[in-house]
Amino acid sequence: MIIIGYLVIFAYIFLLLFVVGPLVKKFYNVECSRKVVHTSLFAIWIFFEIFLKGTIHQVIIPFIVTIMNTISNKFKIFKSIERDSEKCYGTIYFSIAVLAVMLFVLVFPQFYYCSGIAIFCLTFGDGFASLIGYNVKSTKIYKNKSLAGSIACFVASVISINALNIFYNIGLTELMLIVIGLAVVVFELIGKDFDNFTVTFSSFILSCIGIKFPNNNIAIVLGLIEIIILIGIVLKNNKEKKISCEF
């Protein structure tokens, strides 16, 4: 099963990098190809679940991918996911974030399904935020982040983690799903170049809390905090825009 897992996972990764990515880049642009590959990587966790769950191999694979991404970033090997800028480390941060959560759940297997939620939020939430935000014109709510992108981020996150919650009977309340979705939006907005970390770790921590304390009281408090932060972000952005217009 382990050997099959390696073959399936790396065949899938190389299919994305050398077939799907280049095709999207050819017909659209590198930003779209980056995010199509980014979003499609949700399946890696499913392969972990089927072939490698609870073994050191769920850590070894993202470690290998981190090395691959680091080399590619330096020499521009995976052209469908590499920007021209040498200071773009998003692909490396992506694999490090996955490595971190898979290492944590190897030590604390009771939170294994939280890694799935984190990776689904990273791939679907952050991925759709960029795909929609980049291709659909709408109001900017914080720096270069758009309202359309944030809505897409929230919807994609909630739908994907709800699917996991139902399929694997994880036990998160419906309100906690919304709280995690809001957290993904907030940390995608403020994460800047480190949003692969902020999105992954915030959704992972909140899902762990949701499993450990499956009641709506904690979810309500967390949700209110997130709403206040979100309102503050929007107000700050509007204030900065007003000041720039005055000058």
Image (cartoon, rainbow, N blue to C red):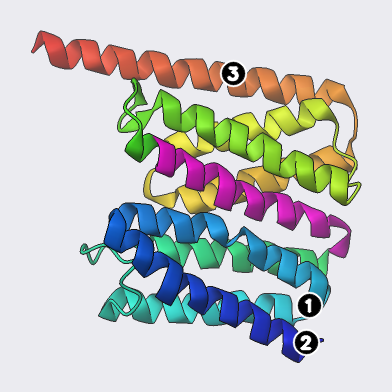
Question: Which element type, helix, strand or loop, lies under badge 1?
Answer: helix
In magenta stretch: residue 64 = no
Q: Among all residues in the image, which is located at the extreme bottom?
A: 3
Of discs 3 and 1, which sits in the foreground?
1
Q: Is residue 157 above or below residue 18?
A: above
Please provide the residue range marked out in magenta: 109-132
Which quadrant of the rendered structure holds the C terminus? top left
* Cα distance between the residues tagged 2 and 3: 43 Å
Tell me how far mark 1 sits from mark 2, CA to CA.
6 Å
Question: Secondary structure beneath disc 2?
Answer: helix
Q: Nearer the viewer, residue 105 or 185?
A: 185
**Which residue type carries mark 3?**
Ile
Mark sitting on residue 15: none
The label nearer to you, 2 versus 3, is 2
* Lateral position of residue 231 relative to residue 145, left or right: right
Mark 1 near mark 2, Cβ–Cβ under 8 Å? Answer: yes
Image vertical order of residue 129 relative to residue 168, above or below:
above
Does 107 appear above or below 113?
Answer: below
Give the mark, 3 or 1, whose residue is nearer the N terminus: 1
Do the residues bearing badges 3 and 1 touch, measured as CB atoms within 8 Å? Answer: no
- Rendering quarter of residue 53: bottom right
- Residue topped by disc 3: 227
Give the residue at x 19% y 12%: 243
Q: Is residue 144 left or right of residue 17?
A: left
Residue at 21% x, 64% y is 84
Q: Is residue 127 magenta?
A: yes
Residue marked by disc 1: 52
Amino acid type shown at disc 2? Ile
